[in-house]
Amino acid sequence: PRLAGQHAAYLAKQMKDFREGRRASEAMGNYLSDHTPEEIQQVAAYFAAQAPVPGIVTEPSVLDLGRVLYVDGDPDRGVPACSGCHGDEGEGTRRFPRLTGQNVDYTIEQMRRYAAGERTNDRGLMQAVAGRRPDDGREGREGFETVFMRKNGERFPLIIYEAPRVDGQGR
């Protein structure tokens, strides 16, 4: 994952969840097992203070569709707007992660883990959302992306994973 610019409170919670076994990763659990709460806060503050790195658009053809999903959700499938929790520009909050510029493969893997019930450290919010995507047997990089244009002209891709619908046009 890209941790630069992620909110310190969110990072600290994730690290505590790894350390205490509420989020699975042998590597992270082992790494954090000896860290004190103060050290976890320091690591979180360090990454939060780093400048975020823009992501890379991998599927330009779905940018508009991704923006609609991000802003409006998909009421037909009960998928809420991503912006409701993750912010209008994917900036995240203390409780919800920054999505803007996140690594595509990491994002896809986390959505898969939520849908499969392998990641459960968020009070069930993302399990419900990830479980509403079509179960059509496809896996991989199908997805929606959108790009936010900052006031200074900087472009930050935001990756939103959601398998396209049967007609291939998101309907």
Image (tube, helix red, strand yellow):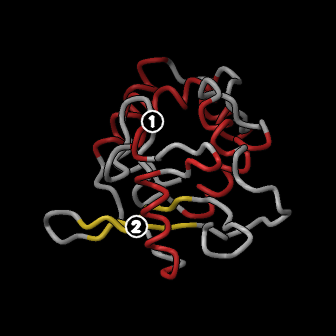
Q: Camera-side residue: 161 or 81?
A: 81
Left or right, 134 with respect to 157, comes to right
Left or right, 152 with respect to 132, comes to left
Q: Camera-side residue: 139 or 30?
A: 139
What's the amino acid at mark 1?
Phe
Q: Earlier in the sequence, mark 2 or mark 1?
A: 1
Tell me residue 150's x, y (percent).
21, 63
Residue at x 56% of width, y 24% of height: 16
Q: Local crowd at mark 1 within 10 Å, few (<14), some, or many (≥20)?
A: some
The residue pinned by badge 2 equals 157
What's the amino acid at mark 2?
Pro
The residue pinned by badge 1 equals 96
Tell me residue 119's x, y (percent).
70, 36
Rendering quarter of residue 8: top left
Q: Local crowd at mark 2 within 10 Å, few (<14), some, or many (≥20)?
A: many
Residue at x 77% of width, y 37% of height: 118
As drawn, the residue found furthest toward the right would be: 137
Residue at x 50% of width, y 26% of height: 13
Residue at x 62% of width, y 35% of height: 31
Left or right, 90 with respect to 12, comes to left
As drawn, the residue found furthest toward the left would be: 152
Tell me residue 41's x, y (percent).
40, 25
The answer to whether 130 is drawn above or below residue 51 in the figure is above
The answer to whether 107 is drawn above or below residue 33 in the figure is below
* Element assignment for label 2: strand
Rendering quarter of residue 21: top right
Q: CA distance from mark 2 to mark 1?
A: 18 Å
